[in-house]
């Protein structure tokens, strides 16, 4: 009976000239209907607002609107590219993202590899659950926790340093030399558990026979990780690394905005916080639009170059 059903299903499959599945209304329309809400939301909230880019080429006035505001060409682009403040925030954004690439990106990979080595399933699930919890805490609460922990009067870090080493209280949140470390560390603590899910899922899809064969050949755990697990993760690592490189000029607004203060602006002010102050507090909508547009173009170029490089070097790419 099952053989008959398989035969009937096989007969329905049709291919076009390119060897791909042909469009069949009865089969494909329900799939397109499921896809439609996501496409509509994407179009409404991500494509329609693109028309706002024209504000970057105008002296935009909310009272005149997009169609009656004065056109100024590339004036705002030239202005911010010659502004020392813009290059300072650009430098901070790139440095923080490079630090994130060096420290935050490998952290979930290492964490997933360590979890994979745990044989006690009860302990493994407990560790996983605990590591996921910070992800569900908002950045408002997380920033409050970080500030409390590092408080010079009641923070646990200063209390330990004082009791153990007799050190004077350190004002971590207003010291420029500590800000980037605090930012990266808090980001790793919050996201390492949830980010490791991708890698754990990829590890679970690796053929167990490869491990059994390696054990017969005398491979220890380190060699199994190096020659089997890491190559099995190469595709997901490549894709996520490309996306990280593609957002080299972007950085999360909330985390920086909630943790920084005027005392550390020199090392903490990034493009997103700079455009927030420029656009919301100083109502320079055209300037912020020009900065955002330039940022998006540079990110796209970086992603394109990284994608081409990955395709040539690793044989994997996003598209």
Image (cartoon, rainbow, N blue to C red):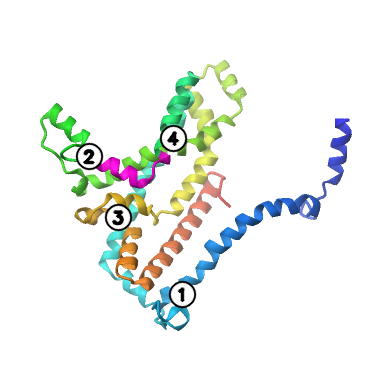
Q: Earlier in the sequence, mark 3 or mark 2?
A: 3
Q: Secondary structure at mark 2?
A: loop
Which region is colored magenta?
135-148
Give the Cα separation between the discs numbered 1 and 4. 42 Å
Give x and y (percent) for residue 242.
Answer: 48, 49
Q: Main secondary structure of the magenta part?
A: helix
- Which residue sits at x=48%, y=50%? 243
Distance Cα–Cα, label 2 vs label 1: 44 Å
Secondary element at image label 3: helix
| Number of numbered callouts drawn | 4
| Residue bearing mark 4 | 132
First in sequence: mark 4 or mark 2? Answer: 4
Q: Earlier in the sequence, mark 1 or mark 3?
A: 1
CB atoms of marks 3 and 2 within 8 Å: no
Q: Pick the residue in front: 273 or 216.
A: 273
In the figure, is residue 183 to the left or right of 159?
Answer: right
Residue at x-position 29% and y-position 63%:
87
**Res 150 label:** 2
- Mark 1 → mark 3, Cα distance in angstroms: 27 Å
- Can you identify the residue that label 1 sits on? 54
Numbered label attached to residue 92: 3
Q: Is residue 83 visible?
A: yes
Q: Is residue 46 above or below residue 61?
A: above
Which of the two labelled residues, at mark 3 and mark 4, occupies the earlier sequence position?
3
Identify the residue shown where x is 28% and y is 41%.
Answer: 146
């Amino acid at each position: 009976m099952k053989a008959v059903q398989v035969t009937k299903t096989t007969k329905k499959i049709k291919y076009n000239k390119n060897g791909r599945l042909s469009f069949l209304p009865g089969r494909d329309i329900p799939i397109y209907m499921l896809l439609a809400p996501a496409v509509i939301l994407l179009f409404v909230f991500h494509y329609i607002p693109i028309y706002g880019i024209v504000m970057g080429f105008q002296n935009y006035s909310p009272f005149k609107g997009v169609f009656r505001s004065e056109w100024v060409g590339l004036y705002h682009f030239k202005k911010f590219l010659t502004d020392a403040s813009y290059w300072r925030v650009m430098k901070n954004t790139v440095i923080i993202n490079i630090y994130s690439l060096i420290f935050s990106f490998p952290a979930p990979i290492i964490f997933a590899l360590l979890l994979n080595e745990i044989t006690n399933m009860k302990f493994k699930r407990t560790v996983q659950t605990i590591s996921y919890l910070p992800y569900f805490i908002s950045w408002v609460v997380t920033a409050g926790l970080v500030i409390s922990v590092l408080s010079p009067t009641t923070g646990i870090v200063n209390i330990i340093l004082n009791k153990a080493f007799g050190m004077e209280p350190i004002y971590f949140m207003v010291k420029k030399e500590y800000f980037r470390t605090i930012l990266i560390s808090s980001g790793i603590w919050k996201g390492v558990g949830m980010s490791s899910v991708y890698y754990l899922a990829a590890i679970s899809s690796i053929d167990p026979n490869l491990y059994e064969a390696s054990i017969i050949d005398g491979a220890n755990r380190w060699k199994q990780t190096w020659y089997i697990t890491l190559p099995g993760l190469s595709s997901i690592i490549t894709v996520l690394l490309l996306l990280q490189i593609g957002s080299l000029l972007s950085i999360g607004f909330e985390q920086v905005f909630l943790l920084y203060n005027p005392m550390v602006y020199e090392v903490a002010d990034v493009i997103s916080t700079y455009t927030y102050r420029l656009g919301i507090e100083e109502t320079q909508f055209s300037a912020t639009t020009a900065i955002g547009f330039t940022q998006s173009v540079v990110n796209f170029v970086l992603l394109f170059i990284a994608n081409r490089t990955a395709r040539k070097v690793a044989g994997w790419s996003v598209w």
